Amino acid sequence: MDKPSTRARLTHVQFVKQAITALKQPPYTGIHTVYSGFNRAFREYFHGDDPVAVCQKLAAEGEIRLFLVRGGAMISLPPEEKKKQNVLKKILEQT
């Protein structure tokens, strides 16, 4: 197994998407940022960066979905249909 120091560092978006995939538990499609331990792990990995601000930015960019809930926020990956529509929209804007 590789040592953590020899691996390439993840970007914010990579870390968040991997965390959602790794930590979600069926039947849920996302994770609670506080109860799952995501916020703590994010701060540890990025040496104090603010997970709230990063997740809000990623949600505004359409990379993730974010819903405010009791005790924090739920984050999930956007539905595949939306991603497909965004690709079509980008293609059609060029014409």
Image: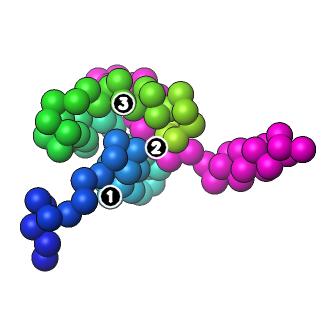
Disc 2 on helix, strand or loop? strand
Q: Disc 2 marks which residue? A: 76
Where are the magenta residues, as a range? 67-95
Q: Give yes or no for contact between labels 2 and 3 (Cβ–Cβ under 8 Å).
A: no
**Quadrant in the picture for the C terminus:** top right
* Residue under the point 56% across and 45% down: 78
Q: Residue most toward the front?
A: 94
Kindly report the distance in space between the C-alpha atoms of the residues bearing marks 1 and 2: 11 Å
Q: Disc 1 marks which residue? A: 22
Q: Quadrant of residue 48?
A: top left
The type of residue carrying mark 3 is Val
Kindly report the distance in space between the C-alpha atoms of the residues bearing marks 1 and 3: 19 Å
Q: Disc 3 marks which residue? A: 54
Kindly report the distance in space between the C-alpha atoms of the residues bearing marks 2 and 3: 14 Å
**Quadrant in the picture for the N terminus:** bottom left
- Left or right: 64 with respect to 90? left
Disc 3 on helix, strand or loop? helix
* Residue under the point 34% across and 42% down: 12
Foreground label between 1 and 3: 3
